[in-house]
Amino acid sequence: MALSKPEYKHNFQCIAEACLDLIKKPLKDILFSQIKPKELFIKVNSNYYLVNNLCQEQQNLCYISPPDLPDYSKFDVTLLCTLIRNLCPNLKPRKGWGRKPRESDTEIGHDIVRLRLFRNKTFAHSRSAAIPDDTFEALWNNLKSVLKRLESHPECGVNYEKEMTEIERSEFTYSKFETFKTLLQGLMNSYYQAQYGGKGSTNTKLVIPSVCKEDAREYQASLSSESNGNKYTVSSNIIRLSVLGEIPFMEDLKVTNENEGITIYYSFVVSEKSPKVQDIKWSKNDQPLDMIYNKFSGGRLTDNCLVIKAPSADDKGKYSCTIKNAVGSVTKDIELNFPCVKISINPTPQSAQETTISSIVKSIPPPEKAQWQTSIDGNEFYDIDVTQQKYAGSYHNPESPYLVIPEITSDDIRFYRLQIWNKLGANVSNDVYLKFTGSLPNITISHETDFDKRSIKLKGVVVLSGDSPGIREVFWSKNGEKIDVHGSCGRLSGVTINDPSLTIKDVSKDDVGKYLLKARNAIGTNTSDVICLDTPSVNILAEKDRMEDDECKCFSVDIKSIPSATRAQWFIKSKGDDTFAPLDVHAAEYQGSTNSLPHPKLALKGKDQLERNCYQIEVTNFVGSTVEEISGKILHK
């Protein structure tokens, strides 16, 4: 009598409405997020279990040939759970679809199992059509926590918890109660008919032709009769069906290159007391693989591999192997594609140091060839011969190639990439640009003349910035030709990396020329300014302030000379004479004159000296002399 309370029947009405209508919605959303309606026919067609185990009513709903599309809203909980379990392996709980989840299991797959268990518990109350408050509260709260969790997933877009509240607040009516009771009992009968009907079952026996893990549950027979308008039901004892055995265990697929073909290896085992493997099926991109073509060989239960002959780019795709026994099936996939390769420079390049460009190669089937390439502009690439000494230490095995540049120079500043081939085709990596810090050597020069030894030292100082590579070579050149210090029989000396100065002994006119210092490091070569060895350059300047004095005219001399001038001498010649004679700078009329270096001077007393005489100066260094005469132009200046 207790179960006849109206509130218990209202509890049943709420649970039945949730079972029949509400819990379908998240399942429908999940299936739609995984498989679009236009894809469902292909998916079902390639699944051995579904093709052979869906009842006719279920096939009429979901197994619809294109261009017609199935309507997911017409699927019941049983069909939705069956499709998700067999077509969405990524949602499978870690312990399988048949295990009751623990409270800590909160993935989508676990909640799908909880919805199915909620449906089964609702079936258990369909005969009494009444649910006590404590049982209702436990069922309702569990369902609410499941739906609230599912709302957080992007696949599920309905406020399920709100709909639960509306169901709970709905008024109890006998018409609605009877409607849900009838629908629920019809759904329960359809479920068991789909599971076991038409396969040898009768009113007195239940036949399960192909037992699987989902059949592990309690069973009970009920006998109903009616007398004098009263209905009587007698139920049998309850038996528990336990199913022994497991689905096959299958190793991951492995791919190798053999005999100009691609070989996919597979292996599987079944545990003790588990049924033997019955069937193996292959598919490509979820379409059954037509094994009758000469393109493929092997792939049977008695084999251990599938061979793809004469592979090409057309053979790219996802290959799936499905192994089935009486308990269920297991599928393993592998993707065949062009190589995927990425390169990087490690470590960050520093000039004059060893640098490695490494690679990460992912390729199924395995790669067969690798080629490093380089480009100046990043557009046109050329193959690199890694056997050259310049790339000593490089490794060109296609599975993990790397390019070694033992000592970077400015010539190595460019783009690099890697091309990889496998049996399906070729692919190239990203481009990397090799550059490094540092600069050319800084050069300063000067000169120093040793009069006693009749020599000149061309002094050079080479300085490097902190991040620049060391000096590799220094040398001097004369008139564009490199000077051979060692071949000078000792007349030339010096020029080392530590002290790049050049000393020239016994300087003579043969040493006249343009000298410059060059210094080279890993980045390149830098060149100094020019030092020009020649006879002195002489420029006579009239001192303006003294030239305005009618009684005294004064001239100074600017001398530039490498090597330094050794002597200066003024000369005088009367206008009627043919030759110049040395000028006595100590004579009274030339008081203030001097032959002293570096600035000789000429002072003329008397305003008619320039009208009566000519004057010139001769400046001498180790390579020769220069004579400059005081002309009318100078006087004018």
Image (cartoon, rainbow, N blue to C red):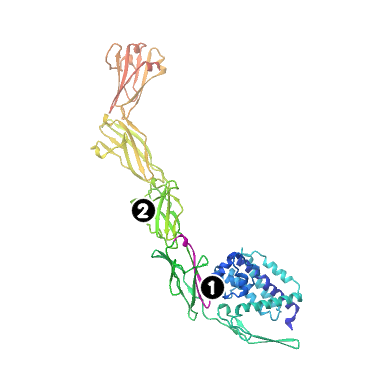
Residue 283 drawn at (x, y percent): 50, 68
The label shown at residue 48 is 1
Tell me the element at label 2.
Answer: loop
Residue 279 drawn at (x, y percent): 49, 75
What range is drawn magenta here? 312-331
Tell me the distance, in whole angstroms, between the alpha carbons under discs 2 and 1: 52 Å
Q: Is residue 325 magenta?
A: yes
Residue 369 drawn at (x, y percent): 39, 58
Mark 2 or mark 1: name the one nearer the start of the chain: 1
Q: Quadrant of residue 589?
A: top left
How would you rate the neighbour count of disc 2 (Cα within 10 Å): few for under 14, some for 14-19, many for 20 or more?
many
Residue ID at (47%, 61%): 314
- Against 258, residue 244 (above or below) is below
Q: Is residue 392 magenta?
A: no
- Against 206, residue 91 (above or below) is above
The label shown at residue 386 is 2
- Secondary structure that dominates the magenta span: strand
Instruction: Evaluate whether residue 24 shows in this view.
Output: yes
Q: Amino acid at mark 1?
A: Tyr
Residue 16 drawn at (x, y percent): 69, 75
Instruction: Evaluate whether residue 92 shows in this view.
Output: no
The residue sitting at the front extreme is 293
Q: Is residue 400 left or right of residue 38?
A: left
Q: Is residue 583 left or right of residue 57?
A: left
Q: Amino acid at mark 2?
A: Val
Q: Nearer the viewer, mark 2 or mark 1?
A: 1
The residue sitting at the bottom extreme is 227
How would you rate the neighbour count of disc 1 (Cα within 10 Å): few for under 14, some for 14-19, many for 20 or more?
some
Residue ID at (59%, 81%): 199
Q: Quadrant of residue 133?
A: bottom right
Q: Of 311 and 158, which appears nearest the observer? A: 311
